[in-house]
Image (cartoon, grey):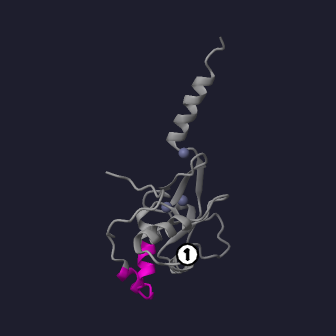
């Protein structure tokens, strides 16, 4: 199985969800741009707007960068797409919405993966004192290093720790 990790433009596969129905159910007009942006977001894993723009162009051709960004903005605003903004990095977009899942981000290579809050419930939405706010999301990003980067570092360290001759 070939994994699309969201790097580089690639023509996305046929959608498994009905994007047209999804747009209509959110009161949005169905346009070629919006469909292409939805396809691009769901084909990648936490893609940047730049990457989505490249995928959309590879997919439907003549479309301005502004049109892609506008469509992405509308979809995010309407809740079809979730935008995450890791500190010091470009915003990332995904189509897994409404479940308050969190993210693991590798400091070394930037790989971003989903991690569930907790099975069956979302404890971090229950603030110690919510000050009467109606809370619907807790933004949690776990920063660290992915297994590949840890392995690469430990290989380098092992090498360095060889006794001097
Ligand atoms: Zn990494
Ligand atoms: Zn995610
Ligand atoms: Zn949580």
The residue depicted at 48 percent of the width and 58 percent of the height is 8
Please report the residue visible at 50 percent of the width from the left and 40 percent of the height from the top. 148
Q: Nearer the viewer, residue 2 or 24?
A: 2
The region drawn magenta spans: 20-38
Report the residue at 46% width, 71% height from top: 57
Ligand 1 found in image quarter: top right
Can residue 19 be seen in this snapshot?
yes
Whole-percent x, y for residue 39 in the image: 40, 71
Q: Nearer the viewer, residue 137 or 61?
A: 61
Is residue 96 visible from the viewing direction of this image? no
**From the viewer's perspective, is 128 left or right of 31?**
right
Considering the whole magenta stretch, tell me its main secondary structure: helix
Q: State which quadrant residue 17 falls in.
A: bottom left
In this view, the residue farthest toward the front is 62
Displayed quadrant of residue 164: top right
Q: How many other residues sit within 10 Å of disc 1, few (<14), some (14-19) or many (≥20)?
A: some
Pointer 1 residue: 65
Residue 25 within the magenta-colored segment of the rendering: yes
């Amino acid at each position: 199985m070939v994994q699309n990790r969201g790097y580089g433009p690639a023509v996305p596969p046929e959608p498994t969800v009905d994007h047209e129905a999804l747009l209509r159910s959110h009161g949005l007009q169905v346009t070629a741009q919006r469909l292409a942006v939805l396809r691009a977001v769901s084909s990648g894993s936490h893609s940047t707007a730049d990457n989505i723009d490249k995928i959309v162009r590879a997919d439907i051709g003549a479309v301005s960068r502004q049109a892609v960004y506008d469509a992405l903005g509308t979809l995010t605003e309407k809740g079809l797409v979730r935008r995450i903004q890791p500190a010091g990095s470009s915003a990332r977009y995904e189509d897994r919405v409404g479940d308050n899942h969190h993210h693991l981000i590798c400091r070394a290579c930037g790989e971003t993966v989903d991690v569930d809050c907790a099975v069956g419930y979302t404890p971090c939405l229950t603030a110690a004192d919510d000050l009467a706010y109606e809370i619907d999301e807790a933004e949690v990003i776990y920063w660290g290093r992915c297994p590949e980067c840890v392995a690469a570092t430990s290989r380098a360290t092992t090498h360095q720790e060889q006794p001097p001759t």
